[in-house]
Structures are given as structure tokens and as C-alpha cells.
Image (tube, rainbow, N blue to C red):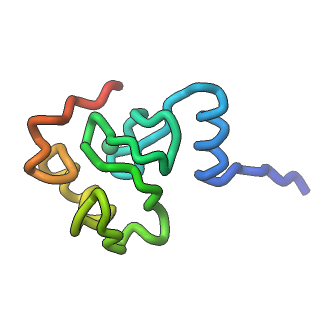
Amino acid sequence: MLRILVPSAALRCRLLSTLNMLVPCPCCRSLTLDRRADDQICKVCFWHDDGQDGDEAELVWGGPNGSLSLTQARANYKAFGACEKRFLSNVRPSKP
Ligand SMILES: [Zn+2]
């Protein structure tokens, strides 16, 4: 039986980071971050990447993203283009 090994999202991010390529923001999925969980702010949605992702997206971690969960930030980005309305003037469009 042929088995295809698909690297996990975390491993893909590490591989892309090793190749000096940008990795996707966990909120808007744009390629804006040098590496994950490194307290970088996404230029497309203004999410502060504190490492939250996957199963923990529903949780409110506090810290740099305040009372925002990643799930809410994603919904906000889809609705109006930033993780929070107050950051609309700080974001830029996503590149294709
Ligand atoms: Zn983003």
C-alpha cells in the first residue's frame, strides 16, 4: 500500500521558515510572517501571532490580542478586512 506522508501544519511552517519564506498568518492565511509564534503582527489583518492556532482558536488568550479569540478575529477579517475594526487603518490588502 502506498502511503503519502503529509507534513503537519506546524512542520510545514517550520520548513517554510527554514527556507526563508514567509509563512501564513493563522488569521487571514496571507503569507506575512517570517515564522510562527514569534509575536509578529500580520500586515494584512493585524493579528498578533502569539502562537494560537488549531484546536485553541476558540479560546481567548488575552495578551496582545486582548479579548479576541482567533476564531472571532478570522470572522472579523472576513467581515471587514481586519482582526478588529480599530486596526482597519493599519492593514494592507493581501497579495495574490
Ligand atoms: Zn493576517
Q: Where 67 falls versus 19 (above or below)?
A: below
Q: Answer with left or right where residue 94 lies relative to residue 55.
A: left
Q: Where 79 falls versus 95 (above or below)?
A: below
Q: Quadrant of ligand 1?
A: top left
Quadrant occupied by the C terminus: top left
Q: Quadrant of residue 61?
A: bottom left
Q: Answer with left or right where residue 1 lies relative to residue 41.
A: right
Question: Observer-nearest residue: 6 or 74?
Answer: 74
View extreme (bottom): residue: 59
Q: Quadrant of residue 20?
A: top right
Q: Residue at x 41, y 47 (%)?
A: 39
Tell me where residue 75 appears, x and y as whole percent.
23, 59
Q: Residue at x 48, y 64 (%)?
A: 54
Quadrant occupied by the N terminus: bottom right
Q: Residue at x 39, y 42 (%)?
A: 40
View extreme (right): residue: 1
